Amino acid sequence: MTGVQGKVVVVTGAGAGIGRATARLFARNGARVVVTDVQEAEGAATVGQIVADGGDALFLTHDVASEEDWQRVLSAAAERFGGIDVLVNNAGIYFIAPVTETTVEDWNRLFSINVTGVFLGSKHVVPHLTERGGGSIINLSSVAGLLGAAGHACYGASKGAVRILTKDLAAELGAQNIRVNSIHPTYVRTAMADYGATMAGKTLDDLGRGMSVLGRLAEPEDVANVIVFLAAEESRYLTGAEIVVDGGGGTSILSV
C-alpha cells in the first residue's frame, strides 16, 4: 500500500492480535510506527519484530483510559518522528455476561477502555493531525456494534458507541481534512476469539463455520489490510464509513 509510505502511525493495543498485525503491516509498507500497549513485554516484542524486518518503530506503555497517558504518548510520538499522520484506536477488552450479571464496575471498566479511550485519543490527536494538514483516525468497533447478541449488552453497547462516535467525528473534522472511519470485524483468531469460543462451548473452527460464508474465522492480517487501506492515500475520499470485515457473516442477529 504505497499511500502510507513515510507516514507516522500510532497503533494502540499493538502488543498482540490485530494491533500487532497492523503495526507490522504499516511498517512493511514504509510507515514509521508507534506501538502502544499496557503490556510492556508484548509491545516491545512487536517493535522487535518490526525492527528485525527493517522497519522503524517506537514502543510506549499506554493506558488508553488515562488522559494524561494520551497526552504523554502523542507528544513523545510527535517528538520522535516529527509529527503524527494516523491514529488507530485498536485497544479494547471483551466481556460476555447476561445483563443481570453485569456489574456497574464491569460496565465502567469496559467503557473506560473501549469508548473513553477512543474519545481521548481522537481528542488529543486532532491538533497533531491538523499540523500535518490532515490525517486519518481509524476506530476498531465490531460486528457487535451493528448486530444484537445475547450476553453482549455491555460489549455491544461500547462498540455501538464507537460506531456513532466515528460518524460524529467524521462530520466535525472533515473541514480539517481529517478522515474518521470505523472497522467492524467478526471474531478474529486472537485471545478474544479464544474467550468467545470457550464461553460458547465451541472450537474456533466451529465459530468460523457458523459465522462466515467463507467457513473460517478472520486472521489478524485480514483486518490489518483494511486498516492500512483506510490510512492510505488510496482511500482519501472515505470518511464516516463503517467497514464490516465478517466474511459475509450476516446482517441481523448473531448466533454463537
Image: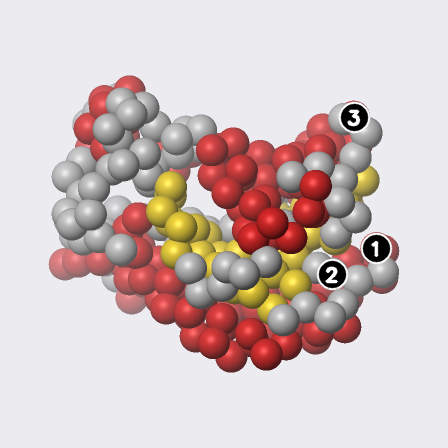
Residue 230 appears left or right of 36 = left
As helix, strand or loop, the secondary structure at mark 1 comes to: helix
Q: Who comes first in sequence, dot 2 or dot 3?
A: 3
- In percent of width and height, residue 170 lies at 49, 71
Q: Which mark is residue 52?
A: 3
Work out which quarter of the rendered image holds the N terminus and state it.
Answer: top right
Kindly report which numbered mark, 2 or 3, lies closer to the viewer in this rendering. Answer: 2
Residue 95 appears left or right of 255 = right
Identified by mark 2, the residue type is Ile
Q: Which residue is mark 1?
A: 81
Mark 2–mark 1 CB contact (< 8 Å): yes
Picture residue at 22% right of the left edge, 52% below the top: 147
* Label 3 packing within 10 angstroms: few (<14), some (14-19), many (20+): few
Q: Who comes first in sequence, dot 1 or dot 3?
A: 3
- In percent of width and height, residue 193 lies at 35, 33
Question: Image quarter for residue 79?
Answer: bottom right
* Front-lying residue, 242 or 21: 242
Q: CA distance from mark 2 to mark 3?
A: 23 Å
As helix, strand or loop, the secondary structure at mark 2 comes to: loop
